[in-house]
Image (cartoon, rainbow, N blue to C red):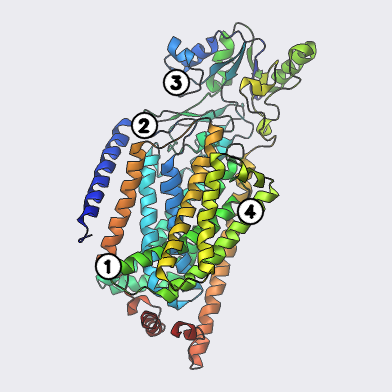
Amino acid sequence: MRRVPVWKWVFIALMAAGAYATYLRAFHGLGAVTHLSDQFPWGIWVAFDVLCGVGLAAGGFTLVAVVHIFNIEKYRPILRPAILTAFLGYLLVVLALMFDLGRPDRIWHALVMWNPRSVMFEVAWCVMLYTTVLFLEFLPVVLEKFNLQAPLKLLHAISVPLIIAGIVLSTLHQSSLGTLYLIVPHKLDPLWYSPLLPLFFFLSAICVGLAMTIFESWHSSRAFGRQLEVSLLGGMSRVLAVLLSVYLVLRFMDLSRRGAIGRIWEPRIESYLFLLEVALMALPALLIFRGHTRRPAVLYAASVMAVFGFVTNRLNVAVTGMERASGVVYLPKWTELAVTLAIIALGFAIFRLAVQYLPIFEETHEENRAGNGAQAEEDYLLTRA
Amino acid sequence: MAKAILFDSTRCVGCRECERACAEKWGNPYNDQIAEVEKLSAQKLTTIETHGERFQRRLCLHCAEPTCVSVCPVGAFEKTALGPVVYDEKKCIGCRYCIMACPFQVPAYEWSEILPRVRKCDMCYARQAKGEPTACTEVCPADATLSGDYEAMVAEARKRIADSPGDYQPYIYGLREVGGTSVLFLSAVPFNELGLRTDLPQSPLPPLTWSVLSAVPDIATSGAVLMGGIYWITHRREAVAKAEGRRPGRQKEVRQ
C-alpha cells in the first residue's frame, strides 16, 4: 500500500461512496438506495454480502477442524489467518445486515421472539453464536499481544468444546443458507432448485473455505515477504480438487435425476451463467489434478477461479435463478454496489491492520496445547525451511 | 368457525369499490391514479386486474398452512383460528423473507419509509371477529365477493358451478393450492388466463424447509459426538506415540 498510493485513493473513494450511500439508506429508506421491489425483495446485499460473505469465511471452520480435530499440525501456520478472515467475514455480514434489514434497530428480536419453524431463525442464531465462537477463537491473538496469561488459560480450558461448537454451528448454517431456498420451488429455476440445496451449500462452502485460505496465504506471503508454504497449500489444493469434483458430480447427478439437465443447453441467460459457474469450479480441479500444485502461480489461479465459481453460484441462486419467476429485471443500483464495495474494502483494510499489529502469522508457545507446543513449532520451522 | 372469502370473477364488473373500501379501511390514499395501477403494493392491499374483458381480484389468499407464517424468523405472522393470516408490525425486523417466499407474491413492503412495514390484507380480522363481513364484501354491488363461513363459501361455489356449468371452469381455485387457502376463486376461463399460478403444488410449502430443519438437533448432536470422537482418536494416537518415544508418523511427510 505504501508503494502503490493509488490503492489508498481507491480505498478513500470507496469509503466516501459508501458513506454517502449509508446516509441515503439511513435517511431515505431502502427504496432510495436499492432497486428492490415487492417482486424482487432480496438483492445483492443478501446474494453477495450475506450468502457469499458467510461462505468466504468458511476457511475458518474448515481449518479449525483440520488442525484441532484431525490434529494435522502442519496446517497450524495458516490457521490464524483463516480464523481472522472468518471472524472479520462474519462481522461484515452482520454489518451488511444492518443495511439490508428494514428495521436494523430490531435485529435483537430474533433472540427473544422465537419461530423455530423458520430457517431464517436458525440462521440468525447460528450466525450470532458462531460469531461469538469466532471472537473467542480469535481472542488469544489479542491476549498474546498484551501478554494476558489468566484469560488465555481460561480460554485454553474451554477450547475443545468451543472448537466443536464452532464446527457444528458452521456446518448447520452454511447448509441452512441453502435451506432458505427450499421454500421457493415455484420461483427458483430448476437449474438451481434442488432438495439437496443444503448439502450443495455446505460442500461448496468447504471448497471456497480452502480456496480462500490458499488465496490469502499467497497474498500475505507477497505482502510480508514470507516464503509461501507451497507444500502446505499443495496438499490443501488436492483436497480442494477432490471436493470440487465430488460437488460437481453430485450437482449433475441431481440435475439429471430431476430431469432438468436438458435445460443447460437452452439458449437462456440462466444456462450461460450456469455453465460459467460450472466452468469456474471444474477448471481449478483440472489444473490441480494435472499436477501443477508446486507452482504457486497455478495454485493461486486455481483458488481465485474456485472463489469466483462459488460467488457465481450464490449470485445465480439468489438473483439469476429468481429473476424469471419474479417478472421483473433486477440490477443493483449504484448505491447497493457502493455499500457492498465499501464493506469489502473495509474488510481488506482491517485484515491488513490486524496482520500488521497482531501475531497472526507467528505461532507462539502459549497458543499451542500443552506438551505439543515444541513439536508444533518444530513442524512450523520445518515447513518454512 | 373458520371464515373465507369467495370471489367470482364471472360476476365482477370491475367497479373497484372493493379497492376503495379496502383503502378506506387501512387509511390508505385512493384516487384514479392509484386505481389505474393494477398491482398489489403497500398502498393497495387488494386490486382488480383487467384481463381482456374479465376482471380478477388479487389479495392475500390466507393459506391454510401459510408460507409467511413459517418463514418469519420472529413469528410476526399468525394463522388465526378464524382463518385470516395476521401480521404484527411490532415484531417485524424487515428481513422480507415473507415477500420472497410467498407463492402468490402478495406481501408488499413500504420501500420508501424509514421505518418500513410489510403490508397485506388481513381479511378484516377485527370485523370478522365481530361477525361482520369484510369491507370489500360489504361494498360489492355484484355479489362477486362474498365472505362468511368457509363451508358455506365452498358450498356456494359448488352450487354456482352446478347451477350453470357452462359459465364456470369446473374447479375452485384455492381448495387445494399449496394445501388450500381461505380465499376461493371462481372463473369462466382457465385460471392462468387471469394471472393466477396454476403450477403450484397441492401440498403446503412449509414442510419443504421443516423436513430439513427438524433434523438440526440430530445433526448437531451426532456431529458434535463425531468431532469429539475424532479429536480423541487423533490426540490419543499422538500421546501413545510420544509415550513410546517416537514421533507421529506424519512427520515424515512434512520433511519431504
Dot 3 alpha-carbon crowd within 10 angstroms: few under 14, some 14 to 19, many 20 or more: many
Name the subunit of mark 3: B
Element on which disc 1 rests: loop
Label 1: few (<14), some or many (≥20) within 10 Å? some
Which residue is tagged 2? B115
| Residue found at x 27% / y 37% | A23
Marks 3 and 2 belong to one chain: yes
User: Image quadrant for the N terminus of chain B?
Assistant: top right
* Mark in front: 2 vs 1: 1
> Which marked residue is nearer to the observer: mark 4 or mark 1?
4
Return the residue nearer the eye: B139 or B203.
B203
User: Mark 1 is on which residue type?
Assistant: Leu
Give above or below for B30 relative to A349: above
Q: Amino acid at mark 3?
A: Gln
The residue beneath circle 4 is A252
Closest to the observer, A249 or B19? A249
Q: Of the residues shown, which amino acid type is indicated by label 2?
A: Leu
Specify whether disc 3 shares its chain with disc 4: no
Residue bearing the label numbered 3? B43
Lower position in the chain sequence, tag 3 or tag 2:
3
| Chain of the residue where label 1 is placed in the rendered structure | A
Name the secondary structure under disc 4: helix
- Please state which of the two labelled residues, at mark 3 or mark 4, is closer to the viewer: 4
The alpha-carbon separation of the residues under discs 2 and 1 comes to 40 Å
Horizontal and vertical percent position of residue B216: 58, 55
Q: Find the distance from the CA under tag 3 to the CA under tag 4.
A: 45 Å
Q: Secondary structure at mark 2?
A: loop
* Crowdedness near tag 2: few (<14), some (14–19) or many (≥20) residues, C-alpha within 10 Å: some
Do callouts 3 and 1 mark residues in contact (Cβ within 8 Å)?
no
Mark 4 or mark 1, earlier in chain: 4
As measured in the structure, the alpha-carbon distance from the residue carrying label 3 to the one carrying label 1 is 53 Å
